[in-house]
Image (cartoon, grey):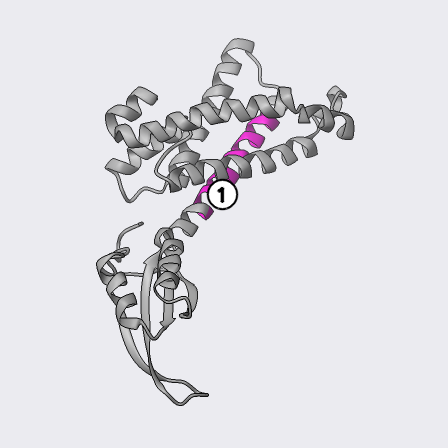
Amino acid sequence: LIIISFIFLGKKTTFKSLYSCIICPLFTTLFTRVIPLYEVVNVLYNYQDPALIQNTSTLLLGALIGGMATGLAVGLAFMVGGSTAGVDTIVLIIKKYFPKTKESVTCFLIDSVIIVGGIAITFTITKEITSYNIVMCFINVMTAIIAAVSIETINNMRRSSITFNIFSEKWEEINEYIIKVLDRGSTIYPVYGGYSQKERKEIKTIVSKKQSEKAKEEILKIDPNAFLTLTISKGVFGEGFQSRFSDE
């Protein structure tokens, strides 16, 4: 998958995926050998009991937490233009050539194929499907659904934009920064202070969530006394943002 990523997605995405390949085993080792958290869990929940390990409520809890954690990790990797170097590499390739597909749905479909394939292989080897296997199949599908929902939640956060309302004496400098550095448009309104009764200028602009933190810092550098209000805007359509028929 790393080789496939290099061919179809380029060096930048592949290096980010390799970073995940290194970090994930390090943290797995950290929380299983250096800090053996599973031992604490075993003591608290008596997981040494084989009957409890196969308890449906225990499996459902594992599916819920595991699905949320997996979806969060994959969603964050997608947000920075990388992957966890697993099947989500295939998801990114599909997204590249079919931009209107949703990463969350594609992840769920691929995971479902793997789950069903696993059940089919188990049946081929054992020649029987036990009630435990059926429950595990359901649990795995549930985990895939929860992971997909988590990925979609992260994607919605990524797509949201930030509206800036800026009141400043140095509005001309700030406006120049917005247009020339951020490469965003702006609207300037004449406003009057309720207390001072003086005319001032208000700048309104919309930037991507990725740009917002840097933009806020730079605007306050230009004018430390600037008054800013930031609001989350969902569904911003137009040049520089998503088109009517685009999923981005």
- Name the residue: 77% across, 30% down: 44
Which residue type carries mark 1?
Ser
Q: Is residue 102 magenta?
A: no
Which of the image's four quarters has the N terminus?
Answer: top left
Nearest to the observer: residue 181 or residue 28: 181
Q: Answer whether residue 150 is magenta in the image.
A: yes
The residue closer to the viewer here, 227 or 55, is 227
Q: How far across and down, in percent of the image, does residue 23 sit?
A: 48, 27
Q: Residues within 10 Å of mark 1 (few under 14, many from 20)?
A: many
Q: Is residue 114 above or below residue 243?
A: above
> Residue drawn at (30%, 38%), measured in percent from left and top?
95
Q: Secondary structure beneath disc 1?
A: helix
Q: Is residue 144 above or below residue 187?
A: above
List the residue tagged with mark 1: 150
Query: Residue at position x 69%, y 32% from top?
Result: 58
Q: Nearer the viewer, residue 118 or 172?
A: 172
Chain part drawn in magenta:
134-153
Percent of width and height locating residue 222 = 34, 64
Q: Main secondary structure of the magenta part?
A: helix
Residue 114 in percent (x, y) is at: 44, 24
